[in-house]
Amino acid sequence: MRCRSLWLVACLFAPIVAQAQQYPVKPIRIVVGFAPGGPTDIYARLIGQKLTAAWGQPVIVDARPGASGNIGADIVAKSLPDGYTLMLPSFSIAVNPSLYTKLPYDLMRDFAPVIMYASVGHILVVHPSVPARNVQELLALAKKQPSSLIYASAGNGTAGHLAGELFNMMLGVKLTHIPYKGMAPAQTDTIGGQVSMLFDSLSTGLTAIRAKRLRPIAVTTLERQPSAPDVPTLSESGLKGYELGAWYGLLAPTGTPRDIVQRLYSEVRRGVREADVRDRFTALGAELVDKNPEAFAEHLRTEIVKWGKVVKAAGMRVE
């Protein structure tokens, strides 16, 4: 009976092993767990263009927004591990194990890390109608009229949400949080004045700032950003030690052949370092990093522990 079971497993994965030797021979799908127009969507399209140029196969970016990326993650976790369905995750995927009571997947069990290729700071922005131009004025307003300040995020457990909770903890205030299904709709409502403020990704926030549709208050990194040198850090604005940076990578389903994972790692690494993509990343406030599958796996383990502590301290929980 055991021999028969092993034979069935071998038969099931034999086509995948054979395809790995010719990969890729058909279109590749990159699932993004947030609404189109946000940073994950932007990076997925840039990477997709480079993979298409290198391999001659179309790369489809498939937006599956909702539940802080969990809907998209579940789709990829349950996909055939043949290298043709991938996920471009962000910071939130390492927060979700602590934030959600139950997940339909296990991050460390169901995914094969491919590469972590970028990190980017966030920037606290407010609608122009908010009568505050720096952290101290914003704090005074939060204490005087706490119900008047509502901050948006790309979803529960995203970097923007954690940035707001860390802000609340360090300043002793309680800003109201509204989660969206991605950074783009969160920014749209902040620009429209439906919400007061947003911890926006530098990738998308700088465009709105330059158009004077949002006012910058401070960045979440420890050092000022080259893309916004005149904007102070939260740490230098009175929240000493405040730091939060988001990161972006690529995941495949567990069981994806090692040589496919390595091909993806090498090609994405090469593609993001080409001048046009590198310059685009810089303009978006992103910094290139290079974590191979093993290093990315270790980073995920570290992030799960780190942000689990923040989630617990803030009493954050999503059923």
Image (spheres, rainbow, N blue to C red):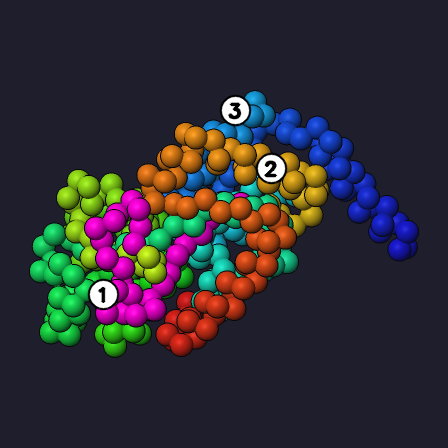
Q: Is residue 138 above or below residue 63?
A: below
Asked whether 256 or 219 is in front, the reply is 219
Asked whether 255 or 260 is in front, the reply is 260
Prevalent SS, magenta region: loop
Cβ–Cβ below 8 Å for labels 2 and 3?
A: no
Residue assigned mark 3: 53
* Disc 3, SS: helix
Q: Disc 3 vs disc 1: which is toward the camera? A: 1
Residue assigned mark 2: 266
* Disc 2, SS: helix
Query: What amino acid type should be assigned to the residue bearing mark 2?
Result: Ser
Q: Is residue 178 above or below residue 111?
A: below
Label 2 and label 3: CA atoms lie apart by 14 Å
Question: Picture coordinates of residue 137 (x, y %)?
Answer: 13, 66
Query: What amino acid type should be assigned to the residue bearing mark 1?
Result: Ser
Question: Picture coordinates of residue 99 (x, y %)?
Answer: 45, 67
Is residue 27 among the parts visible in the rendering?
A: yes
* Disc 1, SS: loop
In this image, 190 relative to 55: left or right? Answer: left
Q: Which mark is residue 248?
A: none
In this image, 105 relative to 170: left or right? Answer: right
Q: Which residues are magenta?
A: 224-251
Instruction: Quadrant for residue 239, please give it.
Output: bottom left
Question: Picture coordinates of residue 280 (x, y %)?
Answer: 37, 35
